[in-house]
């Protein structure tokens, strides 16, 4: 049972590290703000879930697990909220999505 | 094995910093800083177990709270600034 839990937690940790890395690369390479936000925020929540659940399996039933659950719940509540606030602030300031500007560029040719 | 996650998180923090330096608009920078904060929380909770010191989890929790409030405050600041600039522009016409 211990070996099973260990293996599961290593798999989750590795997947979490991978998705965190993919999010970082996406946030650097995507063409405009909204696509960058897509890359960053989706893998932010997925990476956080995978890494924190992986650590939780290592910690077992202890105070650390409760703290980890609190961190996870808090991240899951705040990350979409700040993404939403960022997108609405950017839209209000007049930043336009890449697809729209691309379409206009095609039409004006 | 914790090392894999630590290194992946550190590399991602580097990429986020690069985006914060490059970022053409203010919002790109805010996005990068927000991402950096989330990754710091993850890094702190991994390091807590890497070095076997669960006290670090309290730091991670505090950092998550501070990061969220900070990002919202900065966004509110820029939003009210852009709104004010827009109304001034309309009145000037």
Image: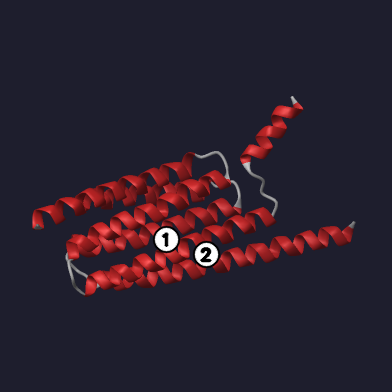
- What residue lies at 24% left-to-right and 57% top-to-bottom? A54
C-alpha gap between disc 2 and disc 1? 9 Å
> Residue lying farthest front?
A1
A86 on left or right of A73:
right
**What colour scheme has been applied to the protein in the rendered image?**
secondary structure
Which numbered marker is on residue B37? 1
Residue B49: image location, x then y, percent: 20, 63
- Secondary structure, mark 2, is helix
Image point (33%, 59%), residue name: B42
* Quadrant in the rendering for residue B56: bottom left
Locate residue B50, reporting x and y percent.
19, 60
Residue A79 visible: yes
> Residue at point 46% right, 65% down?
A78
Q: Are marks 2 and 1 on the same chain?
A: yes
What chain does mark 1 sit on?
Answer: B
Please identify the residue farthest to the right as the structure is shown.
B93
Q: First in sequence: mark 2 or mark 1?
A: 1
B47 left or right of A80?
left
- The quarter in which the N terminus of chain A is drawn is bottom left
Res B1 visible = no
**In x, y percent, where is residue B53?**
19, 69
Q: Is residue B63 left or right of residue B86?
A: left
Quadrant showing the C terminus of chain A: top right
Check contact, mark 2 vs mark 1: CB within 8 A: yes
- Residue A99 vertical placement versus B16 (above, below): above
Q: For residue B89, which numbered disc appears in the image? A: none
Q: Residues within 10 Å of mark 2 (few under 14, many from 20)?
A: many
Instruction: Please give left or right for residue A84 compared with residue B57 in the image.
Output: right
Q: Which residue is mark 2?
A: B71
Give the residue displayed 55% in from the left and 47% down from the top. B23
């Amino acid at each position: 049972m211990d070996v099973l839990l260990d293996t599961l937690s290593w798999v989750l940790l590795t997947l979490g590290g991978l998705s965190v890395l993919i999010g970082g690369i996406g946030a650097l390479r995507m063409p405009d703000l909204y696509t960058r936000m897509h890359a960053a925020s989706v893998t932010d929540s997925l990476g956080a879930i995978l890494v924190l659940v992986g650590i939780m399996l290592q910690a077992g039933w202890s105070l650390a697990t409760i703290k980890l659950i609190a961190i996870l719940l808090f991240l899951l509540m705040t990350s979409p909220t700040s993404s939403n606030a960022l997108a609405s602030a950017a839209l209000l300031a007049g930043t336009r999505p890449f697809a729209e500007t691309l379409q206009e560029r095609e039409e004006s040719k | 094995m914790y090392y894999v996650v630590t290194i992946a998180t550190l590399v991602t923090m580097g990429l986020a910093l690069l985006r914060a330096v490059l970022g053409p608009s203010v919002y790109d920078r805010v996005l990068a800083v927000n991402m950096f904060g989330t990754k710091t929380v993850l890094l702190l909770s991994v390091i807590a177990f890497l070095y076997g010191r669960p006290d670090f989890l309290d730091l991670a929790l505090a950092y998550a709270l501070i990061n969220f409030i900070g990002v919202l405050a900065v966004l509110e600041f820029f939003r009210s600034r852009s709104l004010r600039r827009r109304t001034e522009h309309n009145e000037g016409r």
